[in-house]
Image (spheres, rainbow, N blue to C red):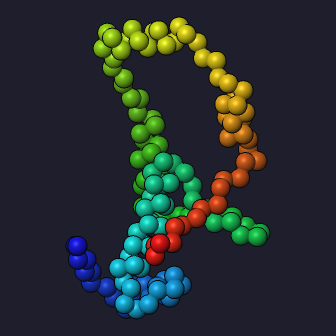
């Protein structure tokens, strides 16, 4: 098992201690705290890397998470979308693609209904749940 050590200052120590208490962890559970924070941070980074906004909804307001790292990830995502990706197919792949396209696309009613629900602007994203780390 690897070992992680970091130099911290009083402000960071206090912030980490407050987070540890909010997560219900004891003082000797620093590895658990790091694991929980890493899980949360990784999720936020994945959302930002995919161009999504991470928001906090209150009763009367909605606030978007803003941070320089998140903005850099969004810039990369926008730049990747702006850059066209070149797809090169060999002769067999080109022939197979032509066969598939000649066959047409006839989605089932169930698939059309599912796609329609996804496109609904009133659709609410599912609530996030986190697995119990002790399980």
At x 36%, y 15%, the residue is 93
Along the line of sight, the residue nearer the viewer: 10 or 35: 35
Residue 119 visible in image? no
Residue 69 percent location from the top left of the image:
42, 61
Residue 1 position (above or below residue 25): above
Residue 74 position (above or below residue 44): above
Residue 20 position (above or below residue 57): below
Left/right placement of residue 78 relative to residue 104 reads left
Residue 70 percent location from the top left of the image:
46, 59
At x 57%, y 55%, the residue is 53
Residue 103 percent location from the top left of the image:
55, 10
Q: How many marks?
A: 0
Kindly indicate the quadrant of the structure image that contains residue 91. Answer: top left
At x 66%, y 53%, the residue is 125
Q: Quadrant of the N terminus?
A: bottom left
Left/right placement of residue 110 relative to residue 128 reads right
Residue 73 position (above or below residue 66): above
Residue 97 visible in image? yes
Left/right placement of residue 131 relative to residue 29 reads right
At x 53%, y 64%, the residue is 66
């Amino acid at each position: 098992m690897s070992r992680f050590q970091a130099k911290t200052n009083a402000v960071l120590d206090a912030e980490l201690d407050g987070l540890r208490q909010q997560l219900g962890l004891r003082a000797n559970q620093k590895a658990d705290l790091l694991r929980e924070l890493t899980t949360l941070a990784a999720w936020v980074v994945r959302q930002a890397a995919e161009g999504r906004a991470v928001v906090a909804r209150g009763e009367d307001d909605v606030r978007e998470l803003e941070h320089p790292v998140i903005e850099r990830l969004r810039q990369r995502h926008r730049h990747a979308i702006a850059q066209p990706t070149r797809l090169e197919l060999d002769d067999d792949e080109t022939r197979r693609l032509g066969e598939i396209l000649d066959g047409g696309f006839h989605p089932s009613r169930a698939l059309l209904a599912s796609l329609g629900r996804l496109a609904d602007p009133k659709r609410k994203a599912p609530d996030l749940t986190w697995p119990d780390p002790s399980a």
